[in-house]
Image (cartoon, rainbow, N blue to C red):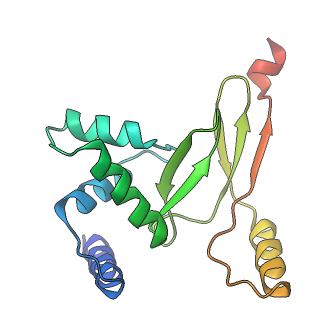
Amino acid sequence: MAEAHQNEKMLKALLNQEGFRLTSQRQKILDLFKACSEGQHLSAEEIHQQLSYQGETISPSTVYRTIHVMVGLGLLRELELAEGRKYYELNAPFLNQHHHLVCVQCGAVTEFEENMMAQVGASQAEIRGYALLDCQFTIYGVCPNCYRA
């Protein structure tokens, strides 16, 4: 409980620092992601649908704007996993740094941690004078189930 309160204080401070408020819509979207099972990724449409099922009256455009703000602040991570669609997940410090292995046939996504990827990303950013914001590594392949079929 104390950790959740600390995360909320940190979130409010970050939003205030960037000139935003912690609106009820932003809080509800973050709560939705916090309730997701590990490895679950949501599209904007799925976020809107799940909030609607919970009885929330939030427009799709509000969901898109809120996601855009949260990605810009580094609270959410934007992913292109399959079919050119964008998916989202909580970003650090809420989630450990990880990468994705995506099956191009069935769309299955497997997450994995590999510190070497983050080290390479940080090194390459530093060499080229970039300020590293995120390091994503996505591998596309065919999963064992589809390969056997």
Q: Residue at x 28, y 52 (%)?
A: 62
Could you tell me how many numbered marks the image carries?
Answer: 0
Left or right: residue 12 compared with residue 73? left
Q: Is residue 101 above or below residue 19?
A: above
Residue 93 rendering spot, x and y as whole percentages? 48, 73
Residue 117 rendering spot, x and y as whole percentages? 79, 66
Q: Can residue 32 be seen by looking at this rendering?
A: no
Q: Can residue 79 be seen by looking at this rendering?
A: yes
What is the quadrant of residue 129 in the picture? bottom right
Left or right: residue 142 compared with residue 61? right
Q: Quadrant of the N terminus?
A: bottom left
Q: Quadrant of the C terminus?
A: top right
What is the quadrant of residue 99 in the picture? bottom right
Q: Is residue 33 above or below residue 92?
A: above
Left or right: residue 1 compared with residue 34? left
Q: Is residue 44 above or below residue 1?
A: above
Give the residue at the far top of this rendering. Answer: 149
Residue 121 rendering spot, x and y as whole percentages? 78, 72
Q: Is residue 29 above or below residue 58?
A: below
Q: Residue at x 79, y 26 (%)?
A: 144
What is the quadrant of residue 122 in the picture? bottom right
Left or right: residue 70 compared with residue 53? right
Q: Residue at x 50, y 48 (%)?
A: 38
Residue 19 rendering spot, x and y as whole percentages? 30, 83
Give the residue at the far front of this rendering. Answer: 61
Q: Residue at x 21, y 36 (%)?
A: 52
